Amino acid sequence: MQLSIKSLTKTYPGDVRALDNISLTIPTGMFGLLGPNGAGKSTLMRTIATLQDADEGSIYLGDIDVLRNKAQIRRYLGYLPQEFGVYPRTSAVSLLTHLASLKGVGDNTKHRREIVDALLFRVNLYDVRQKAVATYSGGMRQRFGIAQALLGDPKLIIVDEPTAGLDPGERNRFYNLLSEVGESVVVILSTHIVEDVKELCQNMAIIHRGQLKFNGSPSSAEASMRGRIWSRSMSKQELRDFQGFRVLSTKLIEGRPIVRVFSETDPGEGFQGAEPNLEDAFFFHIQ
């Protein structure tokens, strides 16, 4: 099963074009939707999740018309928004059981509880299942969010900025969980963190100002930059006076700026050829 998006357009009041004729085909597996804040990622995710309507275009999951059969698609959908609220004093097992009941998961109470316990075990929250979700750390809450998104064996899972604010350990645990989930279903990972896409996704798209700027694999995005990325170290004063090249990024290493530029030919001035990375491709496409 794959997700097919064709000519999707959404304009907000004030003539703000959040989506501008977006067309994508997303196969089974992890798909990264990369873009800066305000690029239109959340608008696209909310439209796919049937939380808002598009002005024009179509979305199909297999042969299901997502925009016209919202009740049907919701039976196949798991959604983890950027922020989700929880009841303040409700335990993980009680809240997940309640959500499972609302979604019609399980043939009876006993079966539903077995499903809930299995999901909490899968996301490594079974030992703390009786604790209130509101007391969980950020990473634990995100793992609970994945558990609720997996209710009902969805065919399409959407996760919106899932690792923002997580420490490196929780982020790695979340990576492993997402990677496992993405082996058999369509998983859309919306993020502005390049490393998330590099480490998790076989396919990706870059969106900026509502427009599709790139669609392909992370490795092909990097390959498209090969031979055209140059870098050099310079002082902060040199950086302030520096101009004339297409600067992609500037990073401090041991307090000294390292500048990466895009150029079809050797720019000279002390620049050396550099191995391209996904961040180079990202900055190139959003400039």
Image (spheres, rainbow, N blue to C red):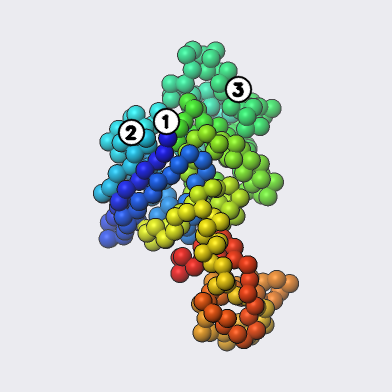
The disc at residue 117 is 3
Query: How far from the left and from the top, in percent, is residue 62?
Result: 37, 35
Residue under pointer 1: 76
State left or right for residue 8 relative to residue 246: left
Q: Earlier in the sequence, mark 1 or mark 3?
A: 1
Q: Earlier in the sequence, mark 2 or mark 1?
A: 2
- What amino acid is found at the position of numbered circle 1 in the picture? Tyr
Q: Nearer the viewer, mark 2 or mark 3?
A: 2
Question: In the image, is residue 267 above or below residue 85?
Answer: below
Residue under pointer 2: 64
| Residue drawn at (29%, 44%) of the image | 58
| Residue drawn at (39%, 58%) of the image | 212
Query: How far from the left and from the top, in percent, is residue 196?
Result: 58, 51
Q: CB under 8 Å between callouts 2 and 3?
A: no
Q: CB under 8 Å between callouts 2 and 1?
A: yes
- What amino acid is found at the position of numbered circle 2 in the picture? Ile
User: Mark 3: which secondary structure?
Assistant: helix
For the residues labelled 1 and 3, the Cα–Cα distance comes to 21 Å
Q: CB under 8 Å between callouts 1 and 3?
A: no
Query: How far from the left and from the top, in percent, is residue 226?
Result: 56, 67
Q: Is residue 243 visible?
A: yes
| Quarter of the figure that contains the N terminus | top left
User: Mark 1: which secondary structure?
Assistant: loop
For disc 3, the neighbor class at 10 Å (few under 14, some 14 to 19, many from 20) is some
Q: Residue furthest right?
A: 254
| Residue drawn at (30%, 39%) of the image | 67
- What amino acid is found at the position of numbered circle 3 in the picture? Asp
State left or right for residue 122 relative to residue 205: right
In front here: 123 or 86?
123
For disc 2, the neighbor class at 10 Å (few under 14, some 14 to 19, many from 20) is some
Q: Nearer the viewer, mark 1 or mark 3?
A: 1
In front here: 180 or 10?
180
